[in-house]
Image (cartoon, rainbow, N blue to C red):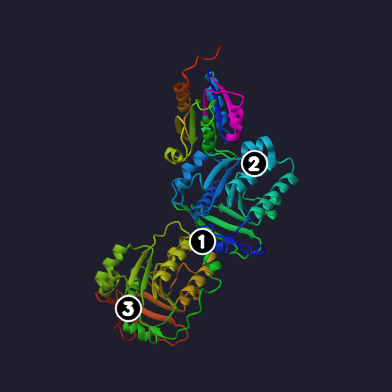
Amino acid sequence: MNDNNELDRMSSGIGGLDIVLQGGFFRGGLYLIQGTPGTGKTTLANQICFNHVARGNRAIYVTLLAEYHARMVQFIGRMSFFDESKIPDQLSYFSGFRVLREEGLPGLLTLVRREIIAKKVSVLVIDGVIAAQRSAEHDQAFNEFVHELQGIAIATHCTLFLVTSADRDAKTTPEHTMVDGILDLSDHSVGWSMPRALHVVKVRGSAYLRGKHAYKITDDGVVVYPRIEALLTEPSTAAHGGQERVTTGIAQLDTMLGGGLPSGSPTLLLGPSGIGKTTFGLQFLSRCSDSAPGLMMGFYETPARILAKAQQVCRPLVNLLGNGAVELLWQPPIDDSLDAYGERLLTAVRRRGVKRLFLDGLGALQSAPAAAERMRQYLPALTNELRIQGVTTLYSLEAANIVGPETRTSFGDLSVLAENLVLLRYVELRSRLHRLISILKVRDSDFDPFLHEFFLTDQGPAVNASAASPRGD
Amino acid sequence: MATVLVVDDEFGIAELFEAILEDEGHRVLTASNGRHGLEVLAKERPDVVFLDYMMPVMDGANMLRRMTADQKLQHIPVVMMSSIPEAAVAERCSGYVKFMRKPFYVSQVTDVVDELVGRSAPPDA
C-alpha cells in the first residue's frame, strides 16, 4: 500500500476498461455500475470479481433482489473468466435481501462490514441496489447508507461496486454525486443492430477517456473497445518524419508518383469494382520483407481467395505469405464497432512492427454503427497512429460509378484520409473499355499529372510509360 | 409429518421449501445463516436440515462442523445445497448425507424428504 494520501489503482482485468479508466479503479473506492436490463451489468461485476480473485485476492458478491445465485452461476459459468475453484474460499456469493428486509439498511451495512473484515476481501459487489433504495424510509436514509458504504470502503481499503438498473432517461440522484465513479452501460437501436456503449459518467480524482466506448459481451465476458479517436488523441510515440519513398511494386507507378509513396503516408486507391484495386494492393505487399513486414486487412475476400489471386497475379507474395513476412487479417463486415476493427488492426500492426498495410475495402467501415457521424474523427485518428508507427498505408475504396469522367464514393471529403490519391477508372472508347490510372495528389511533392493506361497481367498491373492518347491509340 | 429446517440466506429459497413441504404436511423452520440455524437447533429437533453451503456470518460448512461435533445434533441428517458442484463442496466439508445442486426441481425436494424421513400422511382435511 502507498502512503495514505496516495490512491492505489486496481486493475479491472479488462484491458479496454482499464484504458478507459486510465489505470483501473481506485482501491477503497465506491463505484456505481448502472444500466438498462440486459446490458451486462451483472456479467461485468462478476468478471471484475473473478479477475480480482485470479490475482490471489478475495471478493464477495452480495445480491439483493437480483438473480438467484444458482441461475447466475449457470450463466456466468459458461464464460472463460469463471473459475469454480475460487468459490467459495476466494469468492463467495451471499444474499443480503433477507437481512435488508428484516433489519433494514443498518442491518445490511453491518453484514457488509463484518463480512469484509471477517473474510479479508478487497472487492465487494452489491447487486440489485434498487432494493436497498426502495427499502429506505426516505432519501436521506439511503444517502446515509451510501455515505457509510463509502466510509467502509475507505477504512477497509475494499473497493465496492453497487450494481443497479437505470432508466434510459435516468436523472441524477444523490448517490450519483456521492460515489467515486459511475459506469453506465447501455444499448440502443441503429437500424437493425443494437450496439452497446460504455460511458464513464465520472471518476473522482482522475482523468479518463470521456464519451462512449463500444463493448461486447462474448464468451470471455465484457470486452471494451476504447473509442479510437479518444484513445489516440495523444500520439503513442514520436511522429515518424521520414522523407524517403517506398516502392509500390510497380516501377511506372513509382515514376508517376515522383519516386514512390512517401514513407509512412496514407494513400487512397480509388476505383470502380473489378478494375484491379486488390491486385495493386497485392503488388504493394509483394515488396515486404522480414525487416519490413506487411499486413492485409480485407473485409470481403477470404484469405483462401486472396492466396489464389496472389498465385495468379503476384507470385512473390505467395512466398511472403508462407514465411510470415505478410499476414492476412480477414474481417467480415459484420455488425461490429469501428473501434473493434481499429483495435484489431492496430494490435496486428504493433505485434509484428508492420511497415506496409493494405486495407482492402475501406467502405466496409461505413457499415459499422455510428460510422457516418464518427468517420471524420475516426479515420484521421487511425491514420495518424499508423503514420506514427511508421506504416505506409494503402487503402482501397470503391467508386460508385463504373465508367465516366466523374468519381463518386460513399465517403465525403477524401482529403481527411489521404495524403496521396490514386485514381483508377474505366474509359469507354471505340467499343472498348480501357483501364486508366492517374495521380490526383501526392504529399508535398510534384507528380505526373497525365492519365496512363494499364493492363492486368499474370505479373500484376502493367502501366504504360507514355500518357494515354485521347483517341485511344 | 416431519419437521424440516431450511438454512439459506437467499430470499425465496426458504419460502419455496415452505410452499412445497407444508402442502405435503410437513413443518418447515427457516434460518438465514449458520448462526441462526444453530440458534434454531438449540430449541428444535428437526428430522432433516437443508443447509446452503455459501452464506454470510456462518456458512454451511461451519454449521455442519458444529453439528457433527455436538452429540445432540450429529444424528440429524443434513442435505447440503449449493450452486457449485458437489466435488468442490466435498473438498471442504463432510458429514452431510445428500447433496442437491442448485437450481433444483420441486420433486427433488419432496423425494429427498420422503427418502430421509419417510412419506408422511397427508394433512387432515
Q: Quadrant of the C terminus of chain A?
A: bottom left
Do dots 3 and 2 share one subunit?
Answer: yes
* Marked residue nearer the N-terminal end (3 or 2): 2
- Residue A240 lies left or right of residue A352; in this view the side is right
Which secondary structure lies at badge 3?
loop
The residues colored magenta run: B26-49
- Residue in view at x 69 percent, y 41 percent: A105
Of residue B76 and residue A361, the one placed in the foreground of this image is B76
Q: Nearer the viewer, mark 3 or mark 2?
A: 2
Q: Are marks 1 and 2 in contact (CB under 8 Å)?
A: no
Work out whether A275 lies above or below A158.
Answer: below
Q: Position of residue A412 (x, y in %)?
A: 50, 70
Q: Which residue is mark 1?
A: A16
Residue A131: which numbered mark, if any? 2
- Residue in view at x 48 percent, y 83 percent: A241
- Residue in view at x 33 percent, y 71 percent: A326
Q: Nearer the viewer, mark 1 or mark 3?
A: 1
* Spatial CA span between label 3 and label 2: 64 Å
* Marked residue nearer the N-terminal end (1 or 2): 1
Q: Amino acid at mark 1?
A: Gly
Which secondary structure lies at badge 1?
helix
- Tell which subunit mark 2 falls on: A
Q: Quadrant of the N terminus of chain A?
A: bottom right
**Membership of B37 in magenta stretch:** yes
Q: Amino acid at mark 2?
A: Ala
Q: Position of residue B18 (x, y in %)?
A: 56, 25
* Spatial CA span between label 1 and label 3: 34 Å
Q: Amino acid at mark 3?
A: Arg
- Residue A443 lies left or right of residue A322; in this view the side is right
Work out whether A217 lies above or below A95.
Answer: below
Q: Which residue is mark 3?
A: A287
**Circle 2 Cα neighbour tier, 10 Å, few/some/many (<14 / 14–19 / ≥20):** some
